[in-house]
C-alpha cells in the first residue's frame, strides 16, 4: 500500500545544490550565474541593448522590425530599460507624425559589457567541463 502524501513529503530530501562553476584550470571561479544582469537576460531587452550598442540611435519602428516584436511588447521592455537608466527615449514629430527614438546610455553600455563578460565566463566554464 502507498505511503500517505504527508509522510512521503517529510522524508524526501531537498535537491542537491548545483556545483559552483569553475574558472580556468579548475580553480573556483566567481558565481557568474548569480551576477548576470536579470534585466538584460531577457531576449527582447538584450536584443534592444545590443542593437543600440551598434547604432547611435534607433527609432521604435526600426527596433520593432529588427526584433520582430509587437508594439506593446517592445514598449513594455523599452520602459524597463529606460527606468533602469540603460536607454533614453526621445519623442519628436516628423512630418506631423510622432517618432520615438532610443539611445543607449553610458550606464547601459557598461551593463552590456558586464553582461557579455559574465556570459563569456559561463561559456568558458562550460567548455572546461567538456574537456574532462
Image (spheres, grey):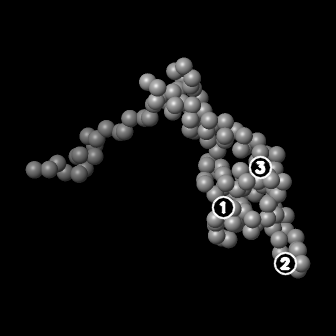
Give SS at disc 2: strand
Q: Residue 103, can we see it?
A: yes
- Checking the image for residue 67, the label placed there is 1
* 9 and 92: which is toward the camera: 92
Q: How far apart in space, not on screen, are marks 1 and 2 (Cα)?
A: 22 Å
The image shows residue 1 at horizontal and vertical percentages of 10, 50
Horizontally, residue 124 falls left or right of residue 11, namely right
Q: Characterize the local packing of mark 3: few (<14), some (14-19) or many (20 or more) Cα atoms within 10 angstroms.
A: some
Q: Characterize the local packing of mark 2: few (<14), some (14-19) or many (20 or more) Cα atoms within 10 angstroms.
A: few
Give the residue displayed 83% in from the left and 75% down from the top. Answer: 98
Horizontally, residue 24 falls left or right of residue 2, namely right
- Checking the image for residue 97, the label placed there is 2
Give SS at disc 3: helix
Q: Mark 3 points at which residue?
A: 53
The image shows residue 66 at horizontal and vertical percentages of 69, 62
Q: How far apart in space, not on screen, are marks 3 and 2 (Cα)?
A: 26 Å
Amino acid at each position: 500500500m502507498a505511503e500517505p502524501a504527508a509522510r512521503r513529503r517529510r522524508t524526501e530530501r531537498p535537491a542537491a545544490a548545483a556545483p559552483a562553476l569553475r574558472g580556468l584550470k579548475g580553480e573556483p571561479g566567481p558565481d557568474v550565474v548569480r551576477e548576470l544582469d536579470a534585466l538584460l537576460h531577457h531576449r527582447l531587452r538584450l536584443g534592444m541593448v545590443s542593437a543600440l550598442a551598434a547604432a547611435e540611435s534607433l527609432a521604435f519602428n526600426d527596433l520593432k522590425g529588427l526584433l520582430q516584436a509587437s508594439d506593446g511588447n517592445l514598449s513594455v521592455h523599452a520602459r524597463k530599460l529606460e527606468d533602469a537608466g540603460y536607454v533614453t527615449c526621445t519623442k519628436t514629430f516628423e512630418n506631423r507624425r510622432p517618432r520615438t527614438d532610443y539611445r543607449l546610455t553610458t550606464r547601459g553600455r557598461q551593463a552590456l559589457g558586464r553582461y557579455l563578460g559574465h556570459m563569456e565566463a559561463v561559456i568558458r566554464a562550460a567548455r572546461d567541463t567538456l574537456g574532462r
